[in-house]
Amino acid sequence: MDDNKLYKALLKSQEERRQHKAQPGEARSEEQFRKERPFAGTQRRIPDLGPIVTDAADHRPTVYDPALSLGMIANPKPWTQQQLREKKIIYPGMPDKRVMDAYRELRIQLRNRAGDKGFTVMYSSLGNDSGSVLTAYNLAAAFAMDAHTSALLVDCDPHDNALPALVSSKMGSGVTDYVADAKVDIKSILYPSGVDRLTVVPAGTRVSHAVELFAAARMRDLMQELKYRYPDRCIILNTPPIRRSTEARILERFADQIVFGVPFGDVTAETAAECVDAVDPQKFAGLVFQE
């Protein structure tokens, strides 16, 4: 495939959409989309383990068991629709149907590409600046909208402080803290997002040594644990911009699929092609053009 032609075609399509006035409307569940493959674990019987015990102080589960689905984790502080609109987070029935449809289509393509198994998607911007976490969050939210699955957003961009504004719960320790300190356990870095069936793991407070921490064996163990404990989970791994960070290249090894964000008008076709060629072609899933 000619990457230059593909890039120009997408640019033209993007410009046409910008010129087209949005028509108000509600995205409805009965809208027809391409059929998605059934996701792993949807038919798996979960044994009755009794009620989930929660800590009244922070509402996080104190029971951490491989048989418990993330979909059972409480969402103590759900965002309202007004708050979701203000934060530009997608939700069922949102007025801008085109945005919802775009994320649904992306979800369908990624799931169909993965087949009948859980998978991890790495999302990284081709631009020079951080700021990919909102798109990564919305991609995770799109998977969380499916009642048969749950989603986990793992933020691995310690240079971007945008995630706390998207999460309804106060966050503390994160990925880098877990990797650096063996006393930190996994359940202490999982936080309800404000969106049903979507849990987040922040990047953490240790920024200066992030490269070394992401390359550590404990980081590998963390990703394996997050991936294999829950068969009904899709993991979205948000990373710093791949063109200017070593972190993204290190984190690539944990991904089953890779999606690049292309800031509109900021990346040339040649640059995009170079970045695509630099990653495993079996993992590269596509480009997301951002206005």
Image: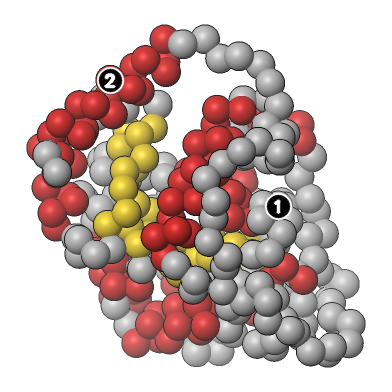
Residue at image position (70%, 52%) is 195
Q: Nearer the viewer, residue 181 or 45?
A: 45
Q: Amino acid at mark 2?
A: Lys
Q: Residue at x 65, y 87 (%)?
A: 66
Q: Which sits earlier in the primary sequence, circle 1 or circle 2? A: 2
Determine contact: label 1, label 2, CB under 8 Å.
no
Picture quarter with the N terminus: top left
Q: Tag 2's secondary structure?
A: helix
Q: Which residue is mark 1?
A: 195
The mark lying in front, picked from 1 and 2, is 2
Q: Looking at this view, is 67 or 268 the one in front?
A: 67
Numbered badge on residue 12: 2
How dense is the environment of label 2, judged by Cα within 10 Å: few (below 14), some, or many (20 and up)?
few
Q: Is residue 96 above or below residue 237?
A: above
C-alpha separation, residue under disc 1 versus residue under disc 2: 34 Å
Q: Is residue 187 above or below residue 255?
A: below
Image position, residue 224 (x, y; %): 45, 83
- The three-letter amino acid code for the residue at tag 1 is Val
> For this view, does 90 lie left or right of residue 5?
right
Q: Residues within 10 Å of mark 1 (few under 14, many from 20)?
A: many
Q: Quadrant of residue 90?
A: top right
Please state, as top left, top right, bottom left or bottom right, where the C terminus lies in the image.
Answer: top left
List x then y, in percent, for residue 60: 76, 72
